[in-house]
Amino acid sequence: MQSLTWIKDKQFYVACALGVFFWGLYAFFVQPIDPVNLFLQTDVLFYSVLIFPILEELVFRGFVQTELMRRNTWTSTVFGISYANILTSVLFCTAHVFQNSLEASLAVFIPSLIFGYFRDRYQHVYASIALHIFYNAGFFTMFSR
């Protein structure tokens, strides 16, 4: 099944390892979220770790980035990152400003580029969704103690 080829991709696992790195950067530069019994709030975890990543990837990578890639002016790349991915990541960060601090919103830019890279690489959002869930799960595990 071609839609699962990303599971065997070494770059996918490097991206997972980068998630751990980003959690550490976030902990160092950005104020952690309020850790008051976050794990007891299963609805917060359910939405933040599963529902929101799926919805965000479907909207940003599945729709916005895909539509931009259909236009030839956005398919060019810089260091292997498409202009469609860059613009989508800017929009992704902007969308996060409404619920987070500016620093926290900017902190999602590079992970967003990584998610978009895998959308471009495989022409679907499965790997992007998996990475986004992994990144959010690690983030909430790290900052909910």
Image: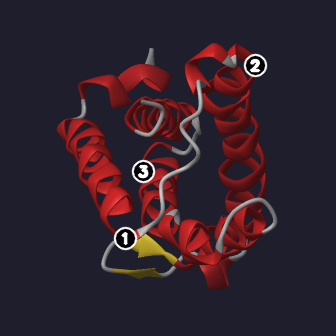
Q: Quadrant of residue 93?
A: bottom right
Circles 1 and 3: CB distance less than 8 Å? no
| Residue type at tag 1 | Phe
The residues tagged by marks 1 and 3 sit, at their Cα atoms, a distance apart of 30 Å
**Above or below — where is 103 with respect to 113?**
below
Looking at marks 2 and 3 on the same chain, the residue that comes earlier in the sequence is marked by: 2
Q: CA distance from mark 1 to mark 2?
A: 27 Å
Q: How is the image coloured?
A: secondary structure
* Residue drawn at point x = 69 percent, y = 57 percent: 66
> Vertically, is 16 above or below 78?
above
Total marks in image? 3
Considering the numbered disc 2 on the image, is that residue within a helix, a strand or a loop? helix
Residue at screen point 68% across, 15% down: 42
For label 1, the residue is 29
**Residue 106 located left or right of residue 87:** left
Q: Which mark is residue 43?
A: 2
Q: Check disc 1: other Cα within 10 Å, few if <14, some if 14-19, many if 20+.
A: few
Which of discs 1 and 3 lies nearer the camera? The answer is 1
Q: Are marks 1 and 2 in contact (CB under 8 Å)?
A: no
Q: Judge depth for marks 2 and 3 and give the one in front.
A: 2
Quarter in which the C terminus is drawn: top left
Between residues 87 and 102, which one lies in front from this camera angle? Answer: 102
Read off the residue under disc 3: 121
Residue 105 sits in which quadrant?
bottom right
Q: Nearer the viewer, residue 23 or 41?
A: 41
| Spatial separation of the CA atoms under disc 2 and disc 3 | 33 Å
Q: Amino acid at mark 3?
A: Arg
Q: Position of residue 68 (x, y in %)?
A: 72, 69
Q: Which amino acid type corresponds to the residue marked 2 in the rendered image? A: Asp
Could you say where residue 129 lies in the image, as x and y percent from the top left? Answer: 56, 34
